[in-house]
Amino acid sequence: TTPESPPSASVPTAKQDYPINSREKIVEKSSGRPKLGIAFGGGAAKGFAHVGAIAVLEKAGIHPDLVVGTSAGSIIAAIYASGMGVPKMLKVVENFKESDVRDLTLSGKGFVEGKKLEEYVNTLVNNRTIEQLPIPYGAVATNSATGEGILFRRGNVGQAARASSSVPGVFIPVKIGKNEYVDGGLTSPVPVSYAKQMGADIVVAIDISDRAKFNSPSGIFSLINQTFTIVQEKILNQELKAADIVVQPNISEIGSTELDKKMEAVKQACPINHDGRPRLALALGGGATKGYAHIGVLRMLDHMGVIPDMIIGTSAGSLVGALYAAGMSSAQLSRLALQLEESDIRDLTLSRQGLVKGEKLQNLVNNFVQNQPIEAFLIPFAAVATEPNSGHTVILDHGNAGLAVRASCSIPGVFIPVEVGGRLLVDGGVSCPVPVSVARELGADIVIAVDISGKPEQDRA
């Protein structure tokens, strides 16, 4: 049963729906295009970066069907779900003062009451309830008694965001019904699972969280943040692996308590190039036969109307990326995947350096791209390889496309190393499994990283 409590002010109390292990979907999937959800993660003062990330996603043509947030992410998600546009959100960030949400108190459970935060959020959403918001909205909190994650989908927006943002030891837990709730980051730092529970077929996760640095905390807030970060990290990796797209703004130099850097956080999350639009790159990682999964991602992006400004591929990712960049559609790639046989690319040999020459792979790629050089592709493309003697990453962004892909796919001990420009090269995955850093080096402002390795991604998009 849903807990009840008396209404607060002129807005009803927030109401929990289901814990994450519920089998019931809160929003049914539509029969048409995939339903897109954005999961806004927690990060305290870094939460302002979400506004920059929203601006980038909108410029890329990505508009959500539903949003869900944890902690600071629940606040930004609520404002976004209210229908507020990016220009007005930027004004809100610019005018924000810590005193707008700080109401100190003396209590054994915390020293910030949180009521001002609740009222602040409700003012921004025009005192509407969750059900009245134009975009379906959810906020994730944690039941302080059971440790269970709870998704709020009805009632008081500000109260739900307050519960989701109540960092233990700082904020007093929020009582709703018979239960008390604290920060949702304890159970779901980036609420990908809850976005899926709300009915999302595709989830974009915006991760602004810190990573544990294991150094000596400089004060009480630093100590609380460090403890929180350590607790969250394992859960965070699991959530991010379940996302379809992970956006990680480059805000590592901004601290979780540095509210004075709010506009810097926004700008770092939304860099703009000379033509007023961020350059979007697709970084396709290696994964051998798992590379077919890249085709599914491309189909998903096609459905969303997202066209990257550049594609960077490592190993299997370079093969799929090259064909797509040359003009092959995701539907054509799907058909090709069904027809391709191992014998089409396997040319066995006896050599100390490997068992497969790789010439058949090179010829196959050149045939499919109609022997175009990389610089003639419709979408700028680069394959990533490794120089084995130095371990350096090599970027192949011009010339023979088949040769570049062959080099990028030449797994040491399996394929014979490939000579390109006087250098012997092997698989790009040796030095750069998911080529986010290469995309940045080539001028990308935002990178969609597709990791098919099954391991938590270490490079930040």
Image: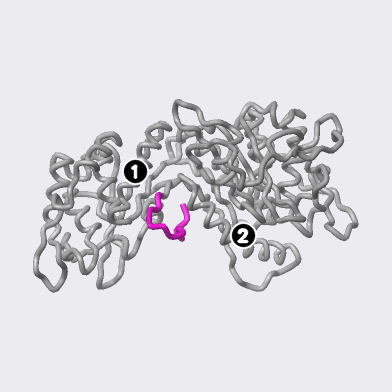
Magenta region, mostly helix, strand or loop? loop
Number of marks in picture:
2
Q: Could you tell whether 108 is left or right of 400 in the image?
A: right
The residue where tag 1 is placed is 310
Lower sequence index among marks 1 and 2: 2
Residue 17 location, x and y as percent?
A: 69, 39
Query: What amino acid type is highlighted by mark number 1?
Result: Met
Q: Residues within 10 Å of mark 2 (few under 14, many from 20)?
A: many
Q: Residue at x 34, y 47 (%)?
A: 293
Query: Which quarter of the figure is the N terminus placed in?
Result: top right
Query: What amino acid type is highlighted by mark number 2?
Result: Gln
Q: Which mark is residue 232?
A: 2
Q: Residues within 10 Å of mark 1 (few under 14, many from 20)?
A: many
Q: Which mark is residue 151?
A: none
What element does badge 2 sit on?
helix
Residue 59 location, x and y as percent?
A: 48, 34
In the image, 179 versus 320, the foreground residue is 179
In the image, 58 versus 323, the foreground residue is 323
Residue 95 location, x and y as percent?
A: 72, 39
Residue reaching furthest to the left: 350
Q: Residue at x 77, y 29 (%)?
A: 127
Residue 399 location, x and y as percent?
A: 18, 49
Choose mark 1 or mark 2, whichever is in front: 2
Q: Tell me how far mark 1 sits from mark 2, CA to CA.
A: 33 Å
Q: In the rendered image, is residue 140 in sight?
A: yes
Segment tinted magenta in the rendering: 450-461
- Is 133 inside the magenta-drawn segment? no
Q: In the rendered image, is residue 264 in sight?
A: no
Residue reaching furthest to the right: 106
What element does badge 1 sit on?
strand
